[in-house]
Amino acid sequence: MPDSGPPDVVLGFDFGMRRIGVAVGSGVSGSAQALTTLHHSGDGPDWAAVRRLVGEWRPQALVVGLPLLESGEEQPITGHARWFMRELGAQFNLPIHQADERFTSTEALARLRTERASGARRKRLSKGDTDAMAAQIILETWLISHRDG
């Protein structure tokens, strides 16, 4: 990827031990949208689904939310998220970036409730909706912070 500007397409991940939210964003517009939620079981992430998403969207970079405590310290899941980042890098040979994900789940739930209250979202909310929206927020935050290079 040349250093001449932001990546055109970026996939963002909200890593969790049960679910992984996924969003897609544009480095040019700085916008992102929630895509889906993948299962993460004792056998690991659904790598086949990750491969399908990477193949479909052809991102130039991947962003993973780094789960930290409110104080900024690492917690047990932080190591798992770092492992996920390393595996993404090994499997897809793409630049991998991390983004602070503190408070994204809270913001995601608030956004989803607002959408429901306004009528923009009709269906009942699920935990998967929150994870995908959290991935969108993680990606939006990263895109904004990298907009000028």
Image: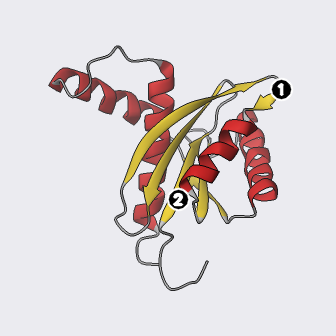
Marks 1 and 2, Cα distance to the nearest angstrom? 26 Å
Instruction: Tell me the kind of residue under disc 1.
Output: Asp
Determine the residue positioned at 69% across, 46% down. Answer: 51
Q: Classify residue 39 by image quadrant.
A: top right
Marks 1 and 2 close (CB-CB < 8 Å): no
Label drawn at residue 10: 2
Q: Classify residue 76 by image quadrant.
A: top right
Q: Is residue 104 visible?
A: no
Query: Image height check: is 129 above or below 8?
Result: above
Q: Position of residue 102 (x, y in %)?
A: 51, 42
Determine the residue positioned at 41% across, 53% down. Answer: 140
Q: Classify residue 30 by image quadrant.
A: bottom left
The first of marks 1 and 2 along the sequence is: 2
Residue bearing the label numbered 1: 43
Determine the residue positioned at 51% across, 70% down. Answer: 7
Mark 2 Cα shell of 10 Å, populated few (<14), some (14-19), many (≥20): many
Q: Nearer the viewer, residue 36 or 100?
A: 36
Q: Position of residue 141 (x, y in %)?
A: 43, 55
Residue ranking furthest to the bottom: 4
Q: Position of residue 52 (x, y in %)?
A: 64, 44
Q: Secondary structure at mark 1?
A: loop
Q: Is residue 106 visible?
A: yes
Q: Quadrant of the N terminus?
A: bottom right
- The tally of labels here is 2
Left or right: 32 as drawn, with respect to 45: left
Determine the residue positioned at 51% across, 24% down. Answer: 128
Instruction: Tell me the kind of residue under disc 2.
Output: Val
Q: Secondary structure at mark 2?
A: strand
